[in-house]
Image: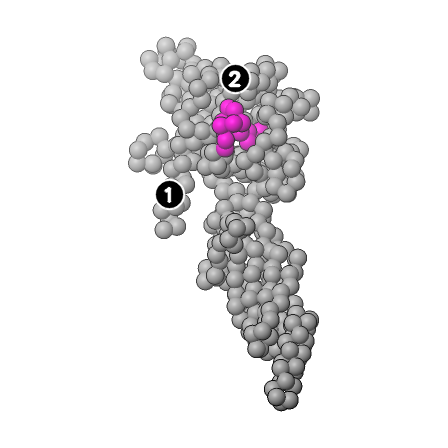
Amino acid sequence: MLVVGSLVVVIALMARLWERFAFRRVTHSRSISRQRAFIGDSLEYSVTLFNDKILPLIWVDIQDAFPDGLELAGGDVRSGGMEMAQQHRITTSLLPYQRVTWTYTLRCTSRGYHRIGPVRLRSGDIFGFSATETQFSDTTHLLVYPRVVDLQQLIFPAENPSGDARGRRPLFQDTTRFIGHREYRTSDPMKHIDWKATARLGELQTKVFEPVVSLNVLIALNGSTSEFAWQGVNRRIFERAVTAAASTASFCAGHGYSFGLISNAVAGYSGKWLSVPLSSATPQLSLVLEALAMAGPYVVTPLVEVLQGERRSLPSGATLVLVTAVMTRALAEEVAEIKQRGYQVLVLYAGDGVPEIELPGVTVFPVGQALEAFDVHEQVLEH
């Protein structure tokens, strides 16, 4: 009985000591090959656990909070239960002074400001009598930019079914500088038809204007996908609008334009709407893409109020590119007011079909169908 009692006391003391010192001098770290990426990119992701002491860890359960917008090839990612959050789980053991590293391929499947962590570690003594846990609050962040496509391909699709050619009309042009005429195409606005040349040549002719060399472009993204807030949010259509806005920014950067971004959509982790002032500096595209990457499908105010606040600071002769998936009467009136003040207005409609409300004198490009086809094509390539 004395021997048995002594063993019980020793085992109990060892279990208490194990529980107390199990996570002393144990460190956990993560690393990602890049902090910024685009949708579809694959990155190297690694997790390291180091036991810097003589006491071994018989078993360790690592539970790391993991976002939905990332895929971890070969990793054990499962639902977190009631918290409705994913967890990346690893179960292992550590000898004294042992360092273990797990390396995975991380694939970016959706845009956003993704946060990995915090992590919780669980372990127990060798006898299985007790268990202890600790949590490391450090987090790792990854910014995934929105998808960027060729804007000309969205606006001016192939002119024949085989896709051999597409419209060559420049997106931005100075209508005060007439340089000639050419044969009319279905993508040309009716207001640019040259009726005198049409009568003279016997077939429809459209005016050709000199492309704009220097231009200020303000991209206005409407975060609303329905006319009324109680109708909810259509995330699929919202992602279309974000893609269209990002593609417009890329187009402007490629042509050396000065451009900026405003939106009534809320930026993740901040609660403020998006705003990037006009600029032609080299990092401008990165700033706009970062803002769009963090855009959430929630609005804090109607886009009309945001546009009204930007009227005073909009340079003379600037172009407003409105990206929206819904056209309300108030928004149409605001567009008419902006155009009346002498600004050029283009609308990229990311909703299904065409806007139900007409915008006289405003060029409207329905890009929803082209974006839908592009997404389907990307999914086919992935599979």
Label 2 vs label 1, nearer the camera? 2
| Among the two numbered marks 2 and 1 on one chain, the one whose residue lies closer to the N terminus | 2
- Would you say 375 lies left or right of 281 here? left
Look at the image and say whether residue 320 sits in the magenta stretch. no
Neighbourhood count class around disc 1 (C-alpha, 10 Å): few under 14, some 14–19, many 20 upward: few
Residue picked out by circle 2 = 329
Answer whether labels 2 and 1 touch (C-beta < 8 Å).
Answer: no
Where is residue 231 shown, x and y percent of the image? Answer: 49, 28
**What is the three-letter code of the residue carrying label 1?**
His
356 and 208: which is toward the camera: 356
Residue range (magenta): 220-233
354 and 342: which is toward the camera: 354
Residue picked out by circle 1 = 377
Where is residue 25 shown, x and y percent of the image? Answer: 69, 71
Residue shown at 58% from the left, 31% from the top: 299
Q: Give the farthest residue toward the left.
A: 162
Where is residue 264 shown, x and y percent of the image? Answer: 60, 30
